[in-house]
Image: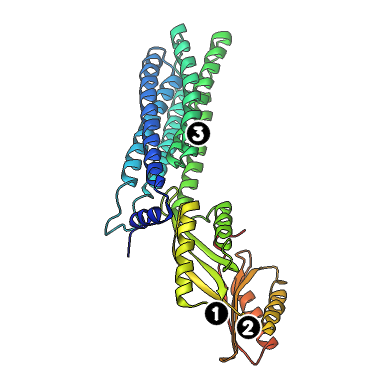
Amino acid sequence: MSTIREKQNELAHEAGNLEETKKLAKRDHAIIRTSVIGILANIFLATFKAVVGIFSHSIAIVLDAVNNLSDAASSLITIIGTKLATREPDKKHPFGHGRIEYLSAMIISIIVLYAGITSFTESVKKILHPDVPDYSVAALIIVTAGVVVKIILGRYVKSMGLKYHSDSLVNSGEDATLDSVISASTLAAAGIYLLKGIALEAWLGAVISLVIVKAGVEMLRDTLSKVLGERVDLSLAKAIKETVLSFSEVSGAYDLVLNDYGPDTFNGSIHIEVPDTFTAREVDELSRTITEKVYAKHNVILTAIGIYSANTDNEQYVQMKHKIQEFVIQDEYVLQMHGFYVDEVKKSMRFDLIISFDAPDRYAVYEKLYGEVCKMYPEYTIQMIMDTDFSES
């Protein structure tokens, strides 16, 4: 069995998609470059803010500096994750290492969550044992500059993450945006203290810490969802099916299953419906051509194409199909019927039903419909399979 990388190279050659390798290399380079920029910017800001926070006795500014260091660590993790994710497949991991990017995004989420909990703890300590802040003009200028830098950096990093489908960069960018809010809040607290003499830093720090904790939990939840395996993007599933159906020999495309092995790295399978008069040679040639075209257009590897045969020699079978389809589709939990075929020699009839996950009891729906169809055609052996909705709305 060939690995994903080997299959990608093979399909790229056959489909004339040789630019794909360059595209992947460009993505890795862009992620690493963006992360390096983030590391340098955050270390620079953390150094200045730590000095200013210590000398001005400002817990908010010190926490701001700590957040900058956590951002630098996040960027470093992104670099390491990207490097590890591009390693060649091996015997133990034949599908490659692309999912490491999801793990690095998870680590960044944990760092954000930890930073929020730690800063909340420190803020509560300062509420119980307050220090009198001593703001200077230089301190306020540095914090103001930090707000501007973090806003620009956050938007840049997140935009690059969205462009290159990197959850690690997206999380880092969102973290940087939160830091800009922290810095802006610190300025607001300083303004209130200078004008009114009221020290709100610790209380403000506690509120901001809770916002950071919430963001960390949401990042972690989203990343865990991808690690567990999410439904494929519906627009991609629809586009792939449209490509498969563009072949005149294919009358239906069903059961698309895509497995995610890292950002923009999918392989999977699909069933196609073709005339029952097709020979093995014709099916083989059609399957290979479909595989090449899907990879060329969508960068998705179809490792298997299953076949549903369609009756072509008897109009009665077509009418039977329509009758059963009209009946089963009346059930609110039946999403689709496909793969219908009648074998008159064996007196058998087979088809698949997609029953929604919304059904309180999918098996009860199946049993009820199976019994009714058997009553409709008692002279036939009914092979009705309960299918699963993997990629359709």
Badge 1 crowding class, 10 Å Cα cut-off, few under 14, some 14 to 19, many 20 or more, is few
In the rendered image, the vertical position of residue 123 relative to residue 288, given as above or below: above
Q: CA distance from mark 3 to mark 2?
A: 56 Å
Q: CA distance from mark 1 to mark 2?
A: 9 Å
Quarter location, residue 255: bottom right
The reply to whether dot 1 and dot 2 touch (C-beta < 8 Å) is yes
Question: How far from the left and from the top, in percent, is residue 349?
Answer: 60, 84
Residue placed under numbered mark 2 in the picture: 313
* 3 vs 1, front mark: 1
Q: CA distance from mark 3 to mark 1?
A: 52 Å
In the rendered image, the vertical position of residue 245 relative to residue 86, given as above or below: below
Q: Secondary structure at mark 3?
A: helix
Badge 2 crowding class, 10 Å Cα cut-off, few under 14, some 14 to 19, many 20 or more, is few
Between discs 3 and 1, the one toward the N terminus:
3
Q: Amino acid at mark 1?
A: Thr
Question: How far from the left and from the top, in percent, is residue 9?
Answer: 35, 53
The structure residue drawn at horizontal position 64% and vertical position 75%, both measured from the top left corner, is 365
Question: How far from the left and from the top, in percent, is residue 274?
Answer: 56, 73
Question: How far from the left and from the top, in percent, is residue 185?
Answer: 53, 21
Q: Is residue 321 left or right of residue 13?
A: right
Front-most of residues 147 and 374 = 374
Front-most of residues 341 and 231 = 341
The mark found on residue 307 in the picture is none
Between discs 1 and 2, the one toward the N terminus:
1
Badge 3 crowding class, 10 Å Cα cut-off, few under 14, some 14 to 19, many 20 or more, is some
Residue placed under numbered mark 3 in the picture: 159
Q: Amino acid at mark 3?
A: Ser
Q: Which quarter of the figure is the C terminus placed in?
A: bottom right
